[in-house]
């Protein structure tokens, strides 16, 4: 049998099998109701031209600025075109939680879980749901979803974690007129929990003609946030393995230090700064203080200093570091006081701290980026 005939027979058999399957399911399948569509109209597919990435970004920006009704509108429009994105269905549920809409928060939380979101431990402490957490409609739905996720997981036996070497990517931006023979300041930016370096590298557009190297490494620990979406964390925990969190925290700090040393070998580097946002901010504090010989200063946005992780002796030894702290006065995810507490604590050890507060929520706005750019370049 020649190649064409063999291919034709194979195609026939596949189509026949599919047709038989469809016939067997015809009695059970009921096509969904849809609005009539003029399939011959030239504009029937105009929705394909919509940039849903812009909708997602607009939703996140509105959420970060505390404009939760606006964010919910953007998320709903985005999800019309990406209905299985469990991560952003969860973000929509968060908006309703912040708005005090318990029934809507519970409904969209359930839809997030049905579309792949499984991190119910995160839901349990997420401050976005604090205003609705004790309501009957939300608490009952939460308990139901915890049981559902647990049942889906099944019995996987005992769990043991072993450290393994791997390669993680780091995004890098250089000045427009970059000259490999020149010396540049290096700024390494650590993204927040659930974000990624591809998104965080976008802060580059908020600087004014930056004359430094901006690098954003990827956090080591991926987790499913629904559908095909992955978020990343700088540390990892599992209730089945006591002591995992501090091990992964320490490994991440060593990894960030390795990133800095690798980049210093590839480029002509002068000063080095470590910047972090939210969970990345916590990492910037601890990594920078415990590896202070690598850095000239730290830029700390919307995060906290974990004084249980660094000793007074370590903090005192790193007091030559310059510190820039920025925090939004309307931040509901990491309270504004977290920034002022870190400032006061470090100043008590003789640190040179610049504190920048801005009107806004959990975000890194352009005005604040320009402020710390000026601070670095002064």
Image (cartoon, rainbow, N blue to C red):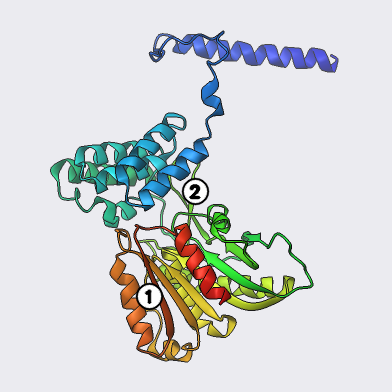
x then y, percent, for residue 354? 42, 77
Crowding near pointer 2: few (<14 within 10 Å), some, many (20+)? some
Secondary structure under tag 2 reads strand
Asked if residue 301 is positioned above or below residue 98 in the image, the reply reads: below
Quadrant housing residue 172: bottom right
In front: 181, or 144?
181
x then y, percent, for residue 144? 24, 42
Residue at the (46%, 88%) spot, across then down: 319
For the residues carrying marks 2 and 1, which lies nearer the camera in this image? 1
Residue at the (38%, 47%) spot, across then down: 62
Residue position marked by numbered label 1 in the rendering? 305
Asked if residue 201 is positioned above or below residue 142 in the image, the reply reads: below
In front: 319, or 220?
319
Circles 2 and 1: CB distance less than 8 Å?
no
Asked if residue 182 is positioned above or below residue 156 in the image, the reply reads: below
x then y, percent, for residue 305? 38, 75
Task: State the CA–CA distance, disc 2 to disc 1.
Answer: 26 Å
Q: In the shown orientation, is residue 329 left or right of residue 265?
A: left
In front: 1, or 254?
254
Image quadrant for the N terminus? top right
Q: In the shown orientation, is residue 253 left or right of residue 245?
A: right
Task: Looking at the image, tell me whether mark 2 or mark 1 is earlier in sequence order.
Answer: 2
Residue at the (25%, 50%) spot, across then down: 129
* Residue 100 in sight here: yes
Secondary structure under tag 1 reads loop
Q: Which mark is residue 230?
A: 2
Q: Which mark is residue 245?
A: none
Asked if residue 47 is positioned above or below residue 186 in the image, the reply reads: above
Name the residue furthest right: 2
In front: 188, or 235?
188
């Amino acid at each position: 049998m020649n190649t064409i005939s063999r291919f034709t027979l194979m195609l026939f058999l596949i189509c026949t099998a599919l047709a038989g399957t469809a016939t067997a399911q015809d009695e059970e399948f009921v096509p969904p109701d849809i609005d009539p569509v003029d399939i011959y109209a030239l504009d029937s597919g105009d929705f394909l031209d919509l940039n849903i990435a812009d909708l997602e970004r607009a939703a996140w920006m509105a959420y970060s600025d505390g404009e939760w009704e606006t964010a919910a509108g953007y998320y709903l429009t985005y999800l019309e075109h990406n209905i299985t994105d469990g991560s952003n269905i969860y973000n929509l549920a968060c908006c309703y939680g912040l708005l005090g809409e318990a029934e809507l928060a519970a409904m969209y939380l359930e839809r997030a879980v049905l579309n792949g979101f499984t991190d119910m431990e995160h839901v349990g402490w997420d401050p976005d749901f604090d205003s609705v957490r004790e309501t009957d409609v939300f608490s009952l739905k939460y308990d139901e979803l915890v049981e559902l996720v647990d049942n889906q997981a099944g019995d996987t036996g005992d769990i043991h974690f072993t450290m393994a070497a791997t390669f993680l990517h780091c995004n890098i931006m250089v000045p427009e007129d970059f000259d490999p023979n020149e010396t540049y300041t290096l700024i390494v930016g650590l993204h927040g929990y659930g974000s990624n370096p591809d998104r965080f590298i976008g802060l580059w557009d908020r600087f004014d003609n930056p004359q430094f190297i901006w690098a954003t490494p990827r956090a080591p620990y991926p987790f499913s946030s629904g559908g095909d979406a992955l978020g990343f964390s700088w540390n990892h925990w599992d209730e089945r393995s006591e002591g995992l969190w501090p091990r992964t925290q320490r490994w991440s700090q060593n990894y960030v230090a390795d990133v800095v040393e690798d980049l210093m070998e590839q480029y002509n580097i002068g000063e080095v700064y470590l910047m972090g946002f939210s969970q990345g901010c916590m990492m910037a504090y601890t990594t920078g203080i415990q590896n202070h010989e690598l850095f000239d200063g730290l830029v700390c946005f919307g995060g906290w200093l974990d004084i249980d992780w660094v000793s007074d002796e370590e903090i005192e030894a790193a007091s030559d570091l310059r510190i820039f702290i920025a925090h939004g006065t309307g931040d509901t995810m990491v309270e504004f006081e977290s920034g002022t507490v870190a400032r006061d604590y470090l100043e008590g050890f003789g640190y040179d701290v610049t504190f920048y507060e801005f009107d806004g929520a959990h975000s890194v706005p352009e005005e604040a980026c320009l402020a710390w750019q000026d601070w670095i370049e002064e």
